[in-house]
Image (tube, grey):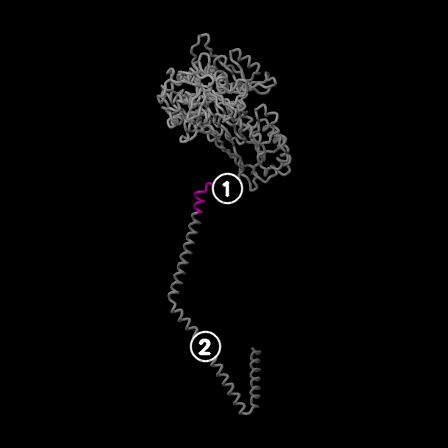
Amino acid sequence: MRNNFKGKESKRKKAKNNNCVETRFDKKELMKIKKNKKEEKAENVEKLRKKLEKQQNKKYKKQIKTKNDKPEEKFSEISRRKRMKVWMLVVVLISCLFIGRIGWIQFVMGDELKQMAYEQQSLDRAVNPRRGTIYDATGKTILAVSSTVNTITVNPNNISKENKEKVANALANIFELDYETVLKKVKRNTSIETIARKVEKEKADELRIWMEDNDIDVGINIDEDTKRYYPYNSLASQVIGFCGSDNQGLDGIEAIYEDELQGEKGRITKVTDANGGEIEGEGENYISAIDGNDLVLSIDATIQGIAEKYLKEACIDNKCTDGGNIVIMNPKTGDILAMAGYPNYNLNEPYETTIEELKPVWDGLSESEQIAEMQKVWRNKAVADTYEPGSTFKLITASAALEEGITTTDKEGEFCCTGGITVAGVRISCWRYYNPHGSESLRQALMNSCNPVFIGLGQEIGVSKYYDYLEKFGLLKRTGIDLPGEAGSIFLSEDKVGPVELATISFGQRFEITPIQMITAVSTIANKGTYVKPRIVKQIIDSQTGEVTDIPVEETKGVISKETAEGVLSMMGSVVAEGTGKNAQVQGYSIGGKTGTSEDGVNTGKYVTSFVGVAPVSEPEVVVLITLYNPTGEGGHQGGGVAAPIGSQVLGEILPYLEINQDNLTEEEIKKEVEVPNVVGMTISEAKKALEEVGLEISYEETEEDVSERIVTEQVPVSGIEIYEGTNVVIEYGEK
């Protein structure tokens, strides 16, 4: 305070001193100074006034502008309100979405998220179900079954660092695995690593003993699993198909009935810590697997074995470079009793060749080359491949002509073969052009397999009507058989068929169908004009309830009349009795049939030889189709000389087995029924002797080495079944 006053006092003294200075000027000068000061002051005041006035003017103008700008102000206010509403709407929408999401998580996804959370804190191991068993038509013979094996896994987080190498070494030694590969799995920071699958009980027990000896009770898991096993190795291999390492069906019935056979997986779960390690004292939660359903096939193991035996012999004896197939069908139910293909493969080793010529070089082939070769034998040619049926197709032309009333079966001299026929300026020869058949009835024309007669009938039927019959017989579409990879037929479209094209179709050439289509069409004739869809599976058996579901028989009546069918069957009987099919005769049975020979393509030099037969002629119970691809042996390639004899062999065994009555035999000629003995566990030599004692024969795969002391592991038919004497019993054998 004092200092302040002192400062003010100093200023006053200074001012006085200044005034004292001013008094030194004269009055005139002083007045001048005062006047200047007064003017200066007035000038400053004027400047200040103008400045204030200017400020006032600016403020006033601004006010005026604001007052006069009412539309803009209104617009601005409206925009502001709209923006507020939009923002409020956005906030409300976001809030609703947030609340909705919370509700969705809480009420809809709650269980799923709980499960996910549980899985994150649990050790989860799958339990594979037992795959359904596949039975043959009898319901007794097992064609495919799942046996119990084990899957070995480890939980790396539960194996201590000091034990990892020891565990890896033990696992590698027991299961014959690469040590470094196993060690990598054991050292990984994961919850589960699979070490080995399909482990047999002996190996699993060896691991259990090692774990006990080394005081290891966690970190290594031995879980029950299943392994697919096929008791009869190659029997019906192209029908049954096989499974992959994960028990998934990859071909045949195994693939197409995957949903029925596979079942549902179970689980073994156990609570873990944050690192994925097992928590001591926490027990396992076991959720049982649901086993797959069983299947009963239409395939009869005994008939299948007979078909495969004679097919193999025929293909080898006739040097069929492209193999062959035999299909046997019940015309009344559509049941495929046998479907054999050669070459075939071992279902238990589906990636190993059974072709003798390939075995020496097999290991030298690349993986892709091996797969390519195996795909050839996996392929079911009876379903997946097409061929020209040749003269067997004359049965369809004869059926259409009879149904249309164009001809009759036995009008003598109705036709005349001159060695060929000219159609639209094109000469088409009879196979016996060098010695024409001359005057013929329809029956004789079929017996002689005379092309010109059937060409003429085709012309009279006409394209449109002929194609109607192709459709009725199911030849323009797939049969729908329950097997994968079925091919469709190859015909010219109706509008592109001229006289020459119709001529070739009428005797079975220049188009292609599948064997399954051909036998189904002939079965329609055998079934007195009713078409029946072919089937492989007859029944499905529920694994949980045992309930049996029958697969329904699907039929279409009225393809041709009963009278027409009986007329064609009668002519087929004549073909075997006196015509080109004489080699298909079976003592004691009335057999009907038709032979066929066609070129495999145009000017290829390859031929397809076939025979289709029915038995008995009056009331057929079976239809058989034999197809051989490119026979190059000394027997030639004619259906009557090559395929018909196989028909005789096959029918000669399956007819007694099916207990189809013999006719035209004396009491001494009628075969007796005998009971099949049990030869499983015997050596082959012992089994042969036991079967011969009751009048039966033995059939097995022969090799260059002596197998007489090998042990019989399976037999078809099984023991206890009554069959006719002279019938073959097919066996499988193992080690000594």
Residue 224 or 395: which is nearer the viewer? Answer: 395
The residue where tag 1 is placed is: 117
Residue type indicated by callout 1 = Ala
Q: Is residue 95 above or below residue 613?
A: below
Q: Is residue 114 magenta?
A: yes
Q: What stretch of residues is rendered in magenta?
A: 101-120
Left or right: residue 158 versus residue 475 is right
Q: Secondary structure at mark 1?
A: helix
Q: Is residue 218 magenta?
A: no
The residue where tag 2 is placed is: 52
Mark sitting on residue 304: none
Residue 142 or 222: which is nearer the viewer? Answer: 142
Residue 115 or 465: which is nearer the viewer? Answer: 465
Residue 140 seen in this snapshot: no
Seen as rendered, the residue at the extreme left is 405
Looking at the image, is mark 2 or mark 1 nearer the viewer? 2
Q: Is residue 353 above or below residue 413?
A: below
Left or right: residue 39 versus residue 471 is right
Residue 558 seen in this snapshot: yes
In the rendered structure, which disc, 2 or 1, sits on the residue that comes first in sequence? 2
Q: Quick one: label 2, few (<14), some, or many (20+) residues within 10 Å?
A: few
Image x and y of residue 269, in percent: 52, 36
Image x and y of residue 713, in percent: 55, 20
Residue type indicated by callout 2 = Leu
